[in-house]
Amino acid sequence: VRGLPLDLTTFINAYRGPLIGLIVSWGAPWADATEIAQDSFSEAWLNRDACLGDWHDLDFLGRWLRGVALNQYRNWFRSRQRRNARIVTLSPSILEQTAVAAELESPERLEALQRGIERLSAVQREVVLMHYLEETSVQEVATLLSVSVKTVEARLFQARRNLRRILGEGFPAV
Amino acid sequence: MPAKMVSEEDIRSALRSKRVNPQNFEAQVRARIALAHNQRAVDPWTGVSPILRAAAAFLPLSVLGCQETPSVARLAPVSIGAKLLGYLAFPAISVFLLLGATLLSIVKILTLRLQNDATPQDQIVQYQAICCWWSDQKWSACGVFVASIALAMFGASWLLFLFYILSFGILIAVITSLARLGIGNRVVVGLSCLQGLMFLGQTAAFPSIGDHDIHFLDQSLVPALFFGGALAIAPLLLLSYQFRAVPNGQASRPVFQRRSGAVVMGVIFTLALASLMAWMLHPSLWPATPSQIKQHVESFDHAPFGSSTWRQWEIPASWAVQSGLEPDFSKPRRLLAEEISGGQDRFILSSAARIGLLSVDQIDQLREYGTMRHALVEELPHSKPDVLTSVGQLDWVIRAAVLRDDLSDHERDIIEQRLHATLKSLAGQEYVTLDDLLRATQLLNVIKRPVVPDLYRATIHGLLREFHSTAGGGFELAGGFRTYRNSPASMPGAPDATSDAVELMAVYGIPDGLDLNWVRSFLRPSRYADRKWIAAVTLDRLNQLPNVTHPTWLEYLYYERTLLAAAILVGLCLFATFSSPIPNIPNNIAVASRELQ
């Protein structure tokens, strides 16, 4: 799709998975991350004329999207803080965990793997969530993070090795 | 041994449950976009920041081409902080935007009427909107204009420009944001900036600007910078005027129209502004170089104001001699010969003798030499040596006597005692001048009885501090040394007295507590010919003083903050103009040009 006139569907399909993964890696729960990602896509698309560059370039629009998403995430974070200050109730993360536990019913091995991903360093967790959530290419991940493809590949490699170390010898490896 | 890793398939499986439905996700995004479109159709200010709304409340939005009523902006519920920021944009709106918009509307109306086009309703509406704005805000806007002129006149120009930078920064943010909403164009913004820069350039061109502060550069650079900014914008506007959208079936497309009237006006404006800038930049671009100083010294063949002209010539001439430039004094010698055959003014003879123009064979022609020399070395019956009442008038007599080797050791002793007595008495005299102190000090050297600086250091330093003036005005800069002791404190310094002070500092050292940056500021390049050469050579002498400290880069930046602020303001104007969309042209000039070709 690179080099062709860009439409909204192509734009969303290219960055949906990595953007949700990126927002989760910043600290938003999965459900909120999806909402933030939807807001970011609509905001970026509506204001694409305002960005100083060629918005038909998928890479350029990806970097623009990341900036928009960061602003959206900050707004969400601030409003969550205000909400938390006013309402004394279960924190969103607990609600999230409860909801996830109820809906997932995952095998024990996959749950251990999910916990292992949580224990990765921030940069490694970031690329794992962005790349493996929807099997997005390394190129899109690199574009969103404004780093090289080689850097993303190196981080993925280290993340998989660290995951093996975290999960222990009993966990199947390749 | 290969590293053991978790398989990619396992990781994907672990995250599979978190995936979203692509169709649902896209539908949600499209729903959000549709909702935003609907909201913007009803209210164009949806999503606009509160600061922008507050600032826009001051703007006559029809000037920028907005067809919507600005009431939504006025009624916007904004915080006090946002309102304050909006108020801060008011001066820039008054000075930059409205001046340009008014002129633009009038020009457009006149142009359309001359072309016998349909009634220019849009332009009239714009013009009426501006008039309405002026009517609403006239007192505030007048206050801004008066405050701008007053601040520049009273020397607070850096504060003025700093304020405008802040104000204009907000205005640019407003205009840029409005441009994203499709309101505003390059012609309006560019012409507004052009008018604003011209106004500030004229404000900054007051002769008194910067006279009261320390500056190392000629402050004519500030208005020149503003006019330079205007000059940079002018061709761009001229180019924009070449393009005009005309109806072409359903859509309008840009066409290239040559408007000879606009081109001629633009060329005249550019030439006039360039000439003005060249005049303003003259002192900075063509400073007094050693070769020019030598040329100036050698060309001295006319003294319209007698001894005063000789004195002004003497200072650069002595510097040229001391610097080893070996100037050709044939013309000054002819002038001296005319003086000797005529009036034989004592001050002129002294100036000539100090430079070394007076020759031994000319001394016999000096009518007063014999009697004045006798009076100089005459021993009086009382024990205390007499002070010399006017060292400046006797200077040539002592130098001539030394030149002719006409003084015995005993006579030299008498003159030495009288010079020391003069130096001691001068400190307490009401009408003492730095010139008298310098001549007495120099004459001790001439008779080979050099002064011991420690003897008079404290006295001279006290006098230098007393004569130093940080007052400016009357076309004279602050930071020089006054000619007379009893001058009022508001009296600025004089170039020749400052030259004397620097030469005294070369002998007695730099007084404690005297900020040499003031003196440097007084001696900065100037376009006034009578002080240009004196200032240049005195500044060089000052910078050559032993143990002198030179200004640091930080000091340069601090003292040239006005210029820095003006440069930032001009940069902001250029940015605002170049980043604004081109009017009635879909893409840009380059694209349009290609289409037309």
Image (spheres, rainbow, N blue to C red):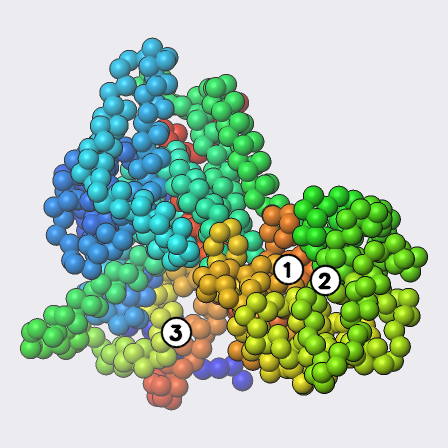
Q: Is residue A98 left or right of residue B171?
A: left
Q: Quickly name the residue at label 3.
A: A123
Q: Quickly name the residue at label 2.
A: B393
Where is residue B569 shown, x and y percent of the image? 43, 50
Residue at the far right: name it.
B361
Q: Secondary structure at mark 1?
A: helix
Q: Is residue A5 left or right of residue B132?
A: right
Residue at the far top: name it.
B116
Where is residue B390 shown, x and y percent of the image? 68, 66
Residue at the far bottom: name it.
A169
Q: Quickly name the residue at label 1.
A: B496
Q: Say which of B81 and B382 sits in front.
A: B382
Decide: is B410 above or below B188. below
Q: Secondary structure at mark 3?
A: helix
The amino acid type, in three-letter code, at marker 3 is Val
State which quadrant residue B111 falls in: top left
- Same-chain status of marks 2 and 1: yes
In whole angstroms, how far apart are the C-alphas of marks 2 and 1? 17 Å
- Residue at x-position 75% and y-position 72%: B442
Q: Residues within 10 Å of mark 2 (few under 14, many from 20)?
A: some
Q: Say which of B259 and A112 sits in front.
A: B259
